[in-house]
Image (spheres, helix red, strand yellow):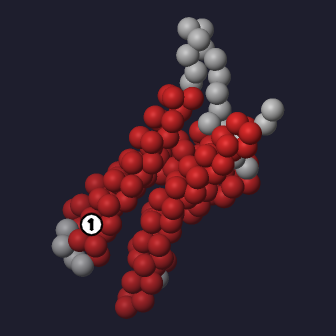
Amino acid sequence: MATFETNNGHTRAAALRNATAIALWTARGSAVVLLALGVYIWTGGADQLITVHVVVGVLLVISLWTIAAIAANSGVSAALVGVAVVWSFVAVLLGLTQEGLVAGEWHWTIQALHLVIAMAMVAWCQVLVVFMGKADATRASRP
């Protein structure tokens, strides 16, 4: 992670590591909640929970954006960070428009695609964290 000296001599590296860990666990936790809510909604259990599902989805997106911002400041490739952020926008767009994309008996394909894209956001979070560790190791090995 990027290391910057503060006025009191402490580094921000610990704070960035903590923020990254919190965002990663938030992404993982929200994914579990989203999966449970999504399956319940998908099986016709509770359409009134769609708003809760959307709010938790926003939490997942914000978690990814947080990790992406820290990754960008930690030396991770701008292209990799950019793809992760674009992926989050695709997930949001699909989530908000899925009801009108394919109707009838084939609507399940859009729901399944939404599930895969949303769960891949958690994978993007993990990928960015791994690359942040590699960027740290590269910086640490330089003389």
Q: Is residue 142 above or below residue 35?
A: above
Question: x and y percent of residue 109 in the render?
Answer: 45, 84
Left of 113 or right of it: where is 137?
A: right
Residue under circle 1?
36
Helix, strand or loop at mark 1: helix
Residue in the picture at 58% in, 52% down: 130
Residue in the picture at 65% in, 32% down: 2
Q: Residue furthest bottom?
A: 105
Q: Is residue 72 visible?
A: no
Name the image quarter holding the N terminus. top right
**Residue type highlighted by circle 1:** Ala
Question: x and y percent of residue 106 in the render?
Answer: 42, 89
Left of 68 or right of it: where is 101?
A: left
Left of 43 or right of it: where is 87?
A: right
Of residue 93 and residue 32, the one placed in the foreground of this image is 32
Of residue 5 and residue 55, the one placed in the foreground of this image is 5
Residue in the picture at 27% in, 65% down: 37
Q: Specify the quadrant of the image occupied by residue 100.
A: bottom left
